[in-house]
Image (cartoon, helix red, strand yellow):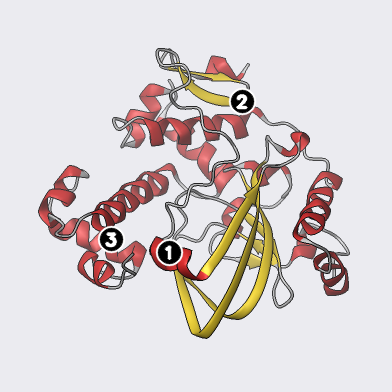
Amino acid sequence: MLGAHLSARYCVVDGAMMARDEIGVFQKPAEIYDPRGRLDPAGFERHVRFSTTAPVEPLKPFVEHFWVIRWDVAEGTYHSAEVMHRPYVDVFLALDQSGIQGTFRGKRVYPASGSGRIIGARFRPGAFHAFWSGELSNLQDQILPLDRVFLGLDQARIEHLLAGSDEEALAALSDLLLSLDPQPDENIALVNAIIAAIEADEALTTVSAVAGAFVRSERWLQQLFRDYLGIGLKWFLQRRRLLAAAELIRASDAPDWIGIAYDLGYSSQQHFITDFRQVLGETPLQYRAGLTRG
């Protein structure tokens, strides 16, 4: 049983991680979308319409949500800057490009001009393992053609699928995923329980701390993440810390740079700046200067 893999601090109820002493605190409805990876939330809200839909029951162990993005930029081009806040895989369909997007480790900038629509499915961390027979590490920083998973899904079929309403297109995408007959895998639930615990417990900031909480060796945890996510647990811990820094910067009119660095566990301000620039492509000061003001 999955619960046997967890320490006394955490248990799994109906596939979700919950603290034994605070049942309910860490539960998160699947329908809620977490926008932490957006680096300019105010600019995104101004230019883009984004909506999510919960998956049908058989897909809930695998799909976090289906999504639709629409934009109508009257003049020029809006550039939406994002980083992945979790190791996700997305399947997306649009008239000009469709594909399977793996976990991108750096910042990505999505240009939006004119008008358009993209529909997609975001898989729960590790869940694409149930649909993909290849190495998950081969999906890092990659967009693969849809026919690598959906045999025979050519451009003509994509255009036919996209000719319908949002609801019809998402229903067709849901049917495509169901046709692959994904099988339950307790390790997918375990990966998501670990991620949820890290996001809920400020003490879980190192691989060692996570290993202790889940009564597993550090090596075993690292291998689990590589097998099911194609990316290490250390990556996720660092990403969480840097996005917390970005949120603090957005929330303050006069950020305390030294305080932010030390509050997030950095030994020096320079170390914080180096990590921030490596992932977000700019220094904390440059990032703040480029934000859209509400």
User: Could you tell me how many numbered marks the image carries?
Assistant: 3
Reply above or below: 83 against 200.
below
- Element type where label 2 sits in the image: loop
Reply above or below: 54 against 41.
above
Residue highlighted by disc 3: 276
**Residue depicted at x 73% and y 67%:** 145
Residue highlighted by disc 1: 106
Using the rendered image of the protein, determine whether residue 267 is visible from the camera's viewpoint.
Answer: no
Classed neighbour count for the residue bearing mark 2: other residues with Cα under 10 Å, few (<14), some (14–19), many (≥20): some
Q: Which mark is residue 15?
A: 2
Q: Which mark is residue 59?
A: none
- Element type where label 3 sits in the image: helix
Image location of residue 135, percent across then percent down? 64, 52
Q: Is residue 225 left or right of residue 265?
A: right
Decide which of 118, 157 is in the foreground and name it: 118
Image location of residue 102, percent across then percent down? 59, 58
User: What's the residue type where badge 1 is placed?
Assistant: Gly
**Residue depicted at x 27% and y 52%:** 245
